[in-house]
Image (spheres, rainbow, N blue to C red):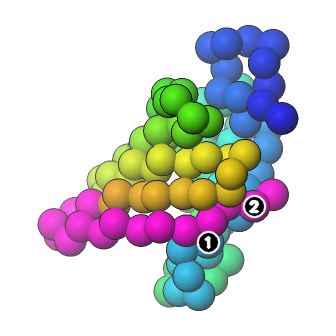
Amino acid sequence: MPNATNTNLFPYAGRSFVVNYGENLVFRNTYSADGKMVITDFLAGDMKGAQMTMPFQWRALEGGDFVLSWQEGDKSTVVHIDNFAAGTTQSFYTMMNGQFYRLTGTISE
């Protein structure tokens, strides 16, 4: 259940979720208790074992969806549309070399 005590605080602050886009891209996103940072631990794929920490922004959408966005250390950009209750995720990822990816997957705690 989302944290409803502070409407300015990301409702899933302090929680971790495994995001699975297939066997080549599985990671755990942990949202800091203050709701300002996301820590990504790569669990499978080419980046397995790597970790990144980035500030992120979020907005609640209708139907339980949340749009989350951040810029990675290499300046690649990420936008997620996540529904934590339904366990669904879509991601739009632009790499610095111009490659663009659209991904659909699942989220679990």
Number of numbered discs overlaid on the protein picture: 2
The kind of secondary structure element at disc 2 is strand
Residue at 46% from the left image edge and 58% from the top image edge: 90
Disc 1 target residue = 20
Amino acid on which the number 2 mark rests in the picture: Ser
Residue 106 lies, in percent from the top left, at 62, 65
Does residue 74 appear anywhere in the picture? no
Label at residue 33: none
Residue 33 lies, in percent from the top left, at 76, 32
Judge left or right: residue 43 versus residue 93: right
Residue at 57% from the left image edge and 35% from the top image edge: 63
For label 2, the crowd category at 10 Å Cα-Cα, with few meaning under 14, some 14 to 19 and many 20 or more, is some
Kindly report the secondary structure that dominates the magenta region of the rendered protein.
strand
Vertical order, 58 against 39 (above or below): above
Residue 80 lies, in percent from the top left, at 46, 50
In the image, 102 versus 36, the foreground residue is 102
Q: Is 103 included in the stretch rendered in magenta?
A: yes
Residue at 24% from the left image edge and 67% from the top image edge: 100
Vertical order, 21 against 92 (above or below): below
The kind of secondary structure element at disc 1 is strand
Quadrant of the rendering where the C terminus is positioned: bottom right
Disc 2 target residue = 108
Residue at 56% from the left image edge and 48% from the top image edge: 82
Judge left or right: residue 18 versus residue 66: right
Which stretch is magenta? Answer: 94-109
First in sequence, mark 1 or 2: give its number. Answer: 1
Quadrant of the rendering where the N terminus is positioned: top right
In the image, 39 versus 23, the foreground residue is 23
- Mark 1 and mark 2: Cα distance apart in space: 8 Å
Judge left or right: residue 99 versus residue 28: left
